């Protein structure tokens, strides 16, 4: 069984149709890139998967491990192993990063009927992971994302992903706003998390990120649906030819 | 500081009725400027007059004090209880809220003393010198009155009766005000604490004044305290109020000498009516930090009159209110920058649930010669229910031309965007909201310098959040 199955998904946001019969399958352990022009619905797909309010599904279904998740709250989806790395991670004043991570991890474990991680285990896990991502211990004591640079926010997203160990990670334009050094750090962090038990959906506008996170499959989105699927070489083709062919085709 | 309006206001800047919610009705003009001729008194006003008439012979103090009381009583008698047409009291109409005035509390009996003994748990982990008051009267056997170099302390009742020079010099003179609640306090003041810190004295322990009130029978107490901190002295003062269905009018006159450092923490967790007045005069190059904490308090009016009398002083005037049910918490500030080169930060936060109401009125006055004043006021309210209401009324009255003053006010429900972020990480909605509220409150409490006090207040806030009805 495929890990994620999206079938004929139609989504409206404030009465505006964004997704238009999108069909997408992600296999276990697969890293899939989703590329497409601005306004093609890439971020909407990410939010709908995570369960954000105000995204109305008018038709179609989304199944994780064969079970529909459309009726589940965002926290329930997270507990089932779904993770969204935000394009614009929000600042949470007053909540220390460490507290946030621990609360999230324990909430997920509790939901799955697992015991809470002991404090030493938790601290060890966070220390190791944050060290590899070049995240200063001082940052962990600070409020989540408050006063963080764009690169630090993205690294913090990857840290959360590493701590929460999702089965399906959706990375929404994780490369946006990053310089090349920050991009490499983030990509390294993502690559370390690649495993046969974890799938990833890497949403990006540019091919650049895919030099560092090499996908197994590339899907091209335009006008709210997947219009082409191919191997990693498809990304390079797009870099050369642009998206115009797909937007014209879909029109 | 989001929402803050920075800049130089070289003109009279006055905004009225900046209500937190788009709900018309509070801002309409209340009509004429005619002096109202009042002939009909409410039962509460009549009861207060009767209480004064019957108590005047027994209240402590000599002739001068009696004259002070009489003068204050005349002011009350002429104006009656403050009501909504008195601008400073427009959101807390005492005349309507006080259906009756309950009798003055008798001297505390064994039960009242026992209740007082059990009070003050919030700060029990702090090694403080405690003075305990039952129904407004000092209970010496529960209080730590041991001598300490540089420190003089005792009860106001005794000081008034003995014609104490410190009390004679300061009571009723710290900050000039025509506020009726203060006048009522002056006319009926029974007991309270009198504390004097000699120049250069730095106490090792905080002093905590514990006020427990309201045993079985409703009673009222008019508490007046005087705290004089001389030049260069250091004091951490805690004033905590708790108790049942009583009516408490508590005023504190605080004199902070030049170069002195004072941290003043007031907690109010009372089920009855609490009217608190701080009258503070602060000298030059002093440091004054206050924090007002209200939680599970039914009806509170906390007014603070703070006068910057000397230059170069820094002050932080802050607070947190946690309200639910039909709680009504009114914080009203009058910050008077009468000297130049002072910095003040006024920061108040409230969390409002149920049908509660949180009021913030903050007025900053900068006198013509108070150049280089730097004052920033910010109030934020977090609404946890549709029925809760926040009223914010910031005012700046600036008569100097070289100052930096600003104010800001926000009122909002917990952010949906933040909630989604937390939920997307697996945190259930209720827990996500609690975490955000905790963070909102925690950020304010973090400003308190004393670790033990900070921890105690955070604990109290978490307890409040933990018992939130959902």
Image (cartoon, rainbow, N blue to C red):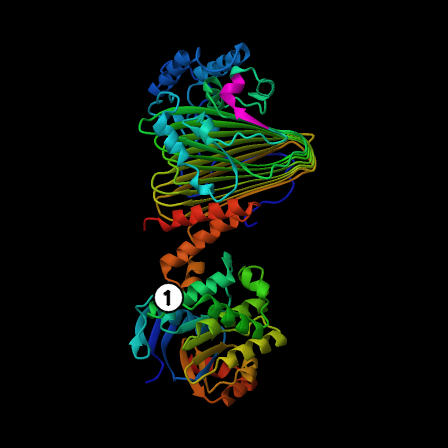
Q: Position of residue B410 (x, y in %)?
A: 49, 46
* Residues rendered magenta in the picture: B152-160
Crowd around label 1: few <14 · some 14–19 · many ≥20 (10 Å): many
In terms of depth relative to the viewer, which is nearer, B164 or B365?
B164
Would residue A128 be found to the left or right of residue B420 on screen? Answer: right
Would residue A118 be found to the left or right of residue A68 on screen? Answer: right
Decide whether residue B154 is among the magenta residues: yes
Residue tagged by mark 1? A75
Q: In the rendered image, is residue A206 in sight?
A: no
Q: Is residue B425 above or below residue B29?
A: below
Chain identity of mark 1: A
In terms of depth relative to the viewer, which is nearer, A191 or B445?
B445
In terms of depth relative to the viewer, which is nearer, B106 or B305?
B106
Q: Is residue A145 above or below residue B80?
A: below
Residue in the image at 49% along x and 48% along y: B455
Decide whether residue A197 is among the magenta residues: no
Q: Position of residue A67 (x, y in %)?
A: 29, 76
In terms of depth relative to the viewer, which is nearer, B432 or B96?
B432
Q: In the rendered image, is residue A212 in sight?
A: yes
Q: Position of residue B460 (x, y in %)?
A: 43, 46
Q: Secondary structure at mark 1?
A: helix
Count of labels in the image: 1
Q: Position of residue B55 (x, y in %)?
A: 41, 14
């Amino acid at each position: 069984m495929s890990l994620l199955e999206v079938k004929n998904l139609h989504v409206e946001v404030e009465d505006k149709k964004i997704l238009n019969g999108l069909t997408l399958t992600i296999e276990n352990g697969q890293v899939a890139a989703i590329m497409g022009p601005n306004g093609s619905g890439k971020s909407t797909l990410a939010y709908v998967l995570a369960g954000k309010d105000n995204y109305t599904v008018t038709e179609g279904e989304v199944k994780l491990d064969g079970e529909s998740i459309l009726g589940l709250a965002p926290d329930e989806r997270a507990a089932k192993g779904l993770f969204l790395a935000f394009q614009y991670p929000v600042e949470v004043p007053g909540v220390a990063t460490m507290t946030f991570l621990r609360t999230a991890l324990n909430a997920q474990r509790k939901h799955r009927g697992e015991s809470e991680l002991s404090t030493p285990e938790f601290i060890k896990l966070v220390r190791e992971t944050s060290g590899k991502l070049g995240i200063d211990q001082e940052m962990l004591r600070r409020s989540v994302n408050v006063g963080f640079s764009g690169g630090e926010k993205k690294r913090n997203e990857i840290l959360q992903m590493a701590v929460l160990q999702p089965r399906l990670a959706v990375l929404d334009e994780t490369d946006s706003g990053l310089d090349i050094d920050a991009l490499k750090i983030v990509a390294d962090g993502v690559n370390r998390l690649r495993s046969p038990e974890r799938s990833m959906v890497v949403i990006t506008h540019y091919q650049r990120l895919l030099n560092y996170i090499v996908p197994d499959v590339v899907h091209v989105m335009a006008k709210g649906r997947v219009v082409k699927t191919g191997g990693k070489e498809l990304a390079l083709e797009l870099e050369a030819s642009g998206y115009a062919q797909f937007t014209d085709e879909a029109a | 500081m989001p929402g803050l309006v920075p800049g130089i206001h070289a003109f009279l800047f006055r905004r009225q009725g900046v209500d937190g919610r788009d709900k018309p009705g509070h801002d309409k003009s209340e009509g004429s400027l005619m002096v109202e001729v009042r002939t009909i008194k409410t039962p509460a006003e009549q009861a207060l007059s009767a209480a004064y008439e019957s108590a005047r012979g027994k209240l402590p103090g000599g002739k001068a004090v009696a004259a002070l009381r009489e003068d204050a009583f005349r002011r009350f008698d002429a104006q009656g209880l403050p009501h909504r047409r008195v601008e400073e009291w427009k959101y807390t109409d005492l005349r309507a809220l006080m259906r009756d005035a309950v009798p003055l509390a008798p001297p505390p009996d064994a039960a009242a003393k026992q209740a007082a003994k059990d009070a003050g748990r919030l700060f029990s982990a702090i090694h403080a010198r405690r003075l305990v008051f039952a129904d407004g009267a000092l209970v010496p056997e529960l209080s730590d009155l041991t001598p300490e170099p540089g420190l003089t302390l005792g009860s106001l009742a005794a000081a008034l009766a003995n014609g104490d020079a410190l009390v004679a010099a300061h009571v009723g003179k710290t900050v000039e005000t025509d506020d009726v609640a203060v006048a009522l306090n002056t006319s009926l003041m029974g007991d309270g604490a009198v504390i004097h810190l000699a120049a250069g004295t730095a106490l090792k322990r905080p002093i905590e004044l514990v006020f427990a009130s309201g045993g079985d029978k409703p009673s009222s107490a008019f508490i007046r305290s005087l705290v004089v901190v001389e030049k260069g002295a250091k004091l951490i003062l805690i004033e905590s109020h708790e108790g049942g269905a009583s009516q408490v009018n508590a005023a504190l006159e605080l004199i902070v000498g030049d170069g002195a450092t004072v941290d003043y923490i007031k907690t109010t967790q009372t089920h009855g009516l609490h009217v608190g007045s701080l009258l503070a005069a602060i000298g030059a190059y002093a440091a004054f930090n206050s924090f007002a904490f209200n939680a599970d308090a039914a009806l509170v009016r906390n007014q603070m009159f703070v006068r910057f009398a000397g230059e170069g002083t820094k002050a932080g005037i802050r607070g947190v209110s946690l309200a639910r049910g039909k709680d009504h918490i009114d914080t009203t500030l009058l910050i008077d920058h009468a000297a130049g080169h002072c910095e003040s930060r006024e920061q108040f936060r409230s969390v409002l649930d149920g049908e509660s109401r949180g009021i913030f009125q903050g007025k900053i006055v900068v006198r013509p010669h108070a150049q280089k004043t730097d004052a920033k006021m910010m109030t934020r309210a977090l609404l946890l229910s549709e029925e809760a209401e926040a009223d914010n009324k910031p005012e700046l009255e600036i008569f100097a031309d070289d100052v930096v003053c600003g104010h800001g006010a926000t009122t909002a429900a917990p952010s949906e965007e933040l909630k989604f972020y937390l939920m997307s990480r697996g945190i259930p909605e209720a827990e996500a909201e609690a975490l955000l509220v905790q963070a909102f409150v925690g950020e304010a409490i973090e400003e308190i310098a004393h670790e033990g006090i900070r921890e105690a207040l955070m604990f109290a806030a978490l307890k409040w959040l933990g018992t939130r009805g959902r």
